[in-house]
Amino acid sequence: MSTESEVDAGVEATTRDEPETVAGDLGAAIADTPEYERFVESKAAVEKSPEAQKKVQEFERLRDEFVQARQTGEATQDDLETLQSAQQDLHTVPAMAEFLEAQEALDARLERVNQEIAADLAIDFGDRVGGCCND
């Protein structure tokens, strides 16, 4: 009778969908962590900070100019040092410094989560990023 097939199909569908369901639960759990909450709050603070926004725009302008100069072979060491100085200046803005610390803490937490996932799979996702074949 088809009842067994329907039950088996239901079990297979549940098993097949389970990783996606668990992934959704994992995403929600990560969103509830103090690290993620701090990251979101500090990102909003950077976006609201006129000082941070001014320095972000300046850094992005200098970065774009440097990338263009590098592509044409006209980038100099002075250009690179100017860009690095602008980045350091940006990082000294209190809102940006807090954001970078929060981002680092969240990255560390996500790395620990990744290690737990990979441990059961015998796969290091970090090694696999960016390439299809790792010999």
Image: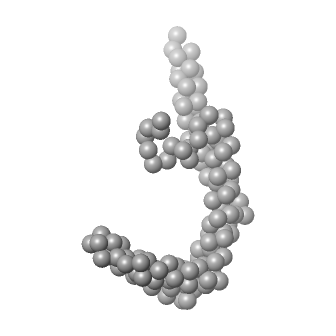
Residue nearer the viewer, 76 or 25: 76
> Among all residues in the image, which is located at the extreme left?
72
The answer to whether one can see residue 45 in this image is: no
Percent position of residue 25, x then y? 64, 48
> Among all residues in the image, which is located at the extreme front?
77
Q: Is residue 59 left or right of residue 33?
A: left
Could you tell me which residue is drawn at 30 percent across and 76 percent down? 74
In the picture shown, does residue 115 fall above or below 68? above
Could you tell me which residue is drawn at 46 percent across and 83 percent down? 82
In the picture shown, does residue 108 fall above or below 2? below
> Among all residues in the image, which is located at the extreme right?
34
Q: Is residue 35 left or right of residue 65?
A: right
In the picture shown, does residue 7 fall above or below 119? above
* Picture quadrant of residue 23: top right
Percent position of residue 14, x then y? 58, 31
Residue nearer the viewer, 4 or 49: 49
Percent position of residue 50, x then y? 54, 89
